[in-house]
Amino acid sequence: MEKNAGTEATMKALLESRLAAMFPDEFIRRRVHKVLQGYGRGVHEHEPGRVRLAILKLAGAELRSVEKYSGYARDDYRTILAWAEYPRQAQQWVAPEAAEKQKMIEADLAEYEGWLHDN
């Protein structure tokens, strides 16, 4: 992720950008935004900006999927982050060799960066 990606303002801007790109219909975009805002209210719901982006990445442009992944995030946000940000690494049951692990890390990062910036 880019240098300032962790700031709340940057996360909000990225989320708004992805919402606009994925949901051109304003009515649906507002509904999706409302569902996403439901995550982060509980004391155990950490990193809301990052998790909301992860939910969007996993759900794609489908409201029901946004609702589904939001529910998963409320159960355990770390799972959503792993699936969205580290898909190759999350599927590994056995630790790969260092060179293979580095390739997976780079591929996961490139995939996520590409999705974030609509490349």
Image (cartoon, rainbow, N blue to C red):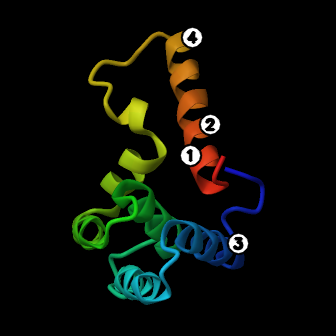
- Distance from label 1 to label 3 (Cα)? 15 Å
Residue at label 4? Answer: 99
Number of residues whose C-alpha sits closer than 10 Å to that of mark 4, classed few (under 14), some (14–19) or many (20 or more): few
As drawn, 28 above or below 71 = below
Q: Which kind of residue does numbered mark 1 sit on?
A: Tyr
The residue lying at 66 percent from left, 65 percent from top is 6
Q: Earlier in the sequence, mark 1 or mark 4?
A: 4
Mark 1 or 4, closer to the camera: 1
Residue 10 image label: 3
As drawn, 35 above or below 98 = below
Q: Earlier in the sequence, mark 2 or mark 3?
A: 3
**Residue 96: image x %, image y %?**
41, 14
Number of residues whose C-alpha sits closer than 10 Å to that of mark 1, classed few (under 14), some (14–19) or many (20 or more): many
Q: Which kind of residue does numbered mark 3 sit on?
A: Thr
Q: Which kind of residue does numbered mark 2 sit on?
A: Ala
Residue at label 2? Answer: 110
- Distance from label 1 to label 4 (Cα)? 20 Å
Mark 3 or 4, closer to the camera: 3
- Distance from label 4 to label 2 (Cα)? 17 Å
**Residue 63: image x %, image y %?**
30, 73
Decide if residue 39 is on the left or right side of residue 118. Answer: left
- Distance from label 2 to label 1 (Cα)? 6 Å
Q: Which kind of residue does numbered mark 4 sit on?
A: Ala
Residue 112 image label: 1
